[in-house]
Amino acid sequence: MRKAKLIEFPQHGDEKGYLVVIEEKLDVPFEIKRVFYIYGSQRDALRGKHANRKSEFMLINVSGTSKVRVDYGNSTEEFDLNRAHVGVYIPKMVWKEMFDFSEDSVLLVLCSELYDPDEYIRDKAVYYSEVNQ
């Protein structure tokens, strides 16, 4: 199984500010087919709570901060998203939960697949059963 990992994107900037460019198959290891963002989440909100059979993800807090916990079925890992030029890559078949959102958090999500509700695993027991086969 592939593991989640932090990826730092190149920053270009000067006294006027910064620009971060993210290109598919160069900066993220997949073709980007869907983009969405999460904002307005309460600090104690727990988002995600699912795994995907086909989709890969890149999560980037473009404003504010949040945390991401991943579960591989036999171990867990946690990531702090607290810099706008750093994202966490999450491969398919990894359980993900996003939490501890700052008030100004905007969590950008890049996906490798179009939305398909049938590829989502929303029951953790089913996820454990599938991932540990």
Image (cartoon, grey):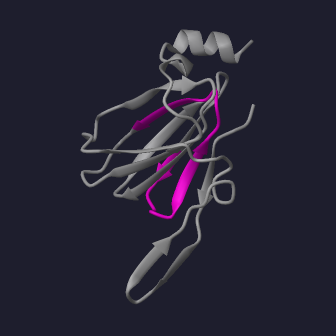
On screen, 112 above or below 82? above
Residue at the image position 51 percent from the left and 32 percent from the top: 96
The C terminus sits in image quarter: top right
Residue at the image position 32 percent from the left and 52 percent from the top: 105
Position of 38 with respect to 75 (left or right) is left
Magenta segment: does it hold 97?
A: yes
Q: Nearer the viewer, residue 14 or 72?
A: 14
Which of the 4 quarters of the picture holds residue 94? top right
* Residue 51: x %, y % from top left: 55, 25
On screen, 15 above or below 77? below
Position of 35 with respect to 7 (left or right) is left
Residue at the image position 53 percent from the left and 59 percent from the top: 86
Which of the 4 quarters of the picture holds residue 57? top right
On screen, 20 above or below 129? below
Q: Nearer the viewer, residue 20 or 73?
A: 20
* Residue 106: x %, y % from top left: 34, 52
Q: Which residues are magenta?
A: 79-98
